[in-house]
Image (cartoon, rainbow, N blue to C red):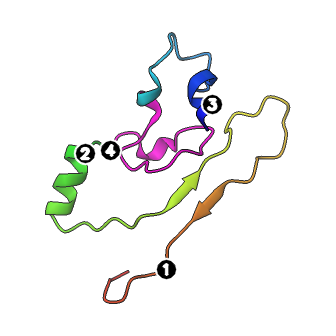
Amino acid sequence: MPYLLRHGTPIRYSYVERAWPAAAYQTVFATEPGSAEMPSASRPFTPEIVTRLVARGVTFAPLVLHTGVSSLEGHEDPYPEFFEVPPRRPGSSG
């Protein structure tokens, strides 16, 4: 991990005109490194939005998803993606 942090760069697709800082690839939910790409469905969430949702009673379940590369160039099969879903906590709904 230290080597990647020092020498690695995020994947940048042709429609992205200029490099973004590494922090732009982190989602508000990220707690550990490991993805090849950002899970784009969570990109619109900000700390402020999450706070407002929690204040309205929305519950978030912690999970880990290390996404693979979504745009494979040689029509390869998708790479496996590591995920971890914790067991349901007693007394929680859902």
Q: Which mark is residue 87?
A: 1
Q: Position of residue 41 (x, y in %)?
A: 46, 46
Q: Is residue 9 visible?
A: no
Q: Which residue is mark 3?
A: 4
Res 7 quadrant in image: top right
Q: Which numbered marker is on residue 47? A: 2
Q: Amino acid at mark 1?
A: Pro
Report the predominant secondary structure element of the magenta stretch: loop
Q: Which residue is mark 4?
A: 45
Q: Earlier in the sequence, mark 1 or mark 4?
A: 4
Name the secondary structure under disc 2.
Answer: helix
- Magenta stretch: residue 40 in it? yes
Q: Secondary structure at mark 1?
A: loop
Disc 1 crowd, CA 10 A, few/some/many (<14, 14-19, 20+): few
Query: Given this view, does label 2 or label 3 mark the residue nearer the observer?
Result: 3
Image marks 3 and 1: residues in contact by CB distance under 8 Å: no
Query: In terms of sequence position, does the residue under pointer 1 or pointer 2 come before the other?
Result: 2
**Residue range highlighted in magenta:** 24-44
Residue 35 image label = none
Residue at 32% across / 83% down in the picture?
92
**Vertically, is 63 above or below 49?**
below
Q: CA distance from mark 2 to mark 3?
A: 26 Å
Residue with the most extreme top position: 18
Which element carries disc 3, helix, strand or loop? helix
